[in-house]
Image (tube, rainbow, N blue to C red):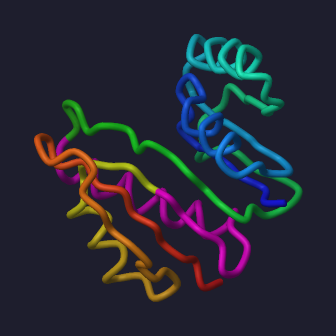
Amino acid sequence: NAQILDPFCGVGTMLIERDIRVPAREKYGIDIFGEAIRGARENASYAGEKINFINRDYFDFTHAYLFDEIITNMPVRGRKSKEETDAFYSRFFEKSAGLLKADGILVLYSNEQGFIRKQLRIRSDYRLLAEQCIREKDQFYLFVIQYKG
């Protein structure tokens, strides 16, 4: 019965897979790239999934109700500096706190574990529940984090 949000959904893979494994009541995918949203809608249609996809920047997104879960593959740093990436993760955790219910869950797939761990150190409103290395070669981790609210 969860309400789930993927703020950087790309072509929708994580939302689709999440709903196939454990069905959710409401699913929202956001991406700043229109082409990705078009692909996500096609993929959801092929999978027989009803998901609301929105072409928007996560940091501009608002919603009438809070979410039980935010699940996402975090954007890769690319050419961004450490300072820019640090600021991005800070904004992400702040924005997510405004969209998650108390005891809501963040599920993050990222190769930027240092920035995530930093946010967990400095923010008392989040608690790490699990951390698992998924791809050792390029250090991609899955983090399960609880928002205390």
| Residue 31 horizontal/vertical position (percent) | 59, 30
Residue 135 figure quarter = top left
| Residue 129 horizontal/vertical position (percent) | 44, 78
Residue placed furthest toward the front: 21
Residue 99 vs residue 3, the one in the foreground: 3
Q: Residue at x 70, y 80 (%)?
A: 102
Q: Is residue 62 above or below residue 126?
A: above
Quadrant of the frame with the C terminus: bottom right
Please tell me whether residue 96 belongs to the stretch shown in magenta.
yes
Is residue 58 rendered to the left or right of residue 117? right
Number of numbered markers: 0
| Residue 30 horizontal/vertical position (percent) | 65, 35
Q: Is residue 28 above or below residue 129?
A: above
Q: Is residue 126 above or below residue 3?
A: below
Q: Residue at x 70, y 12 (%)?
A: 42
Q: Residue at x 74, y 61 (%)?
A: 67
Is residue 120 rendered to the left or right of residue 144? left
Quadrant of the frame with the N terminus: bottom right
| Residue 43 horizontal/vertical position (percent) | 65, 17
Residue 122 vs residue 2, the one in the foreground: 2
Q: Residue at x 73, y 73 (%)?
A: 101
Q: Which residues are magenta?
A: 81-107
Q: Is residue 98 above or below residue 126?
A: above
Is residue 72 rendered to the left or right of residue 20? left
Residue placed furthest toward the bottom: 124
Residue 43 vs residue 35, the one in the foreground: 43
Is residue 63 rendered to the left or right of residue 13? right
Residue 48 figure quarter = top right
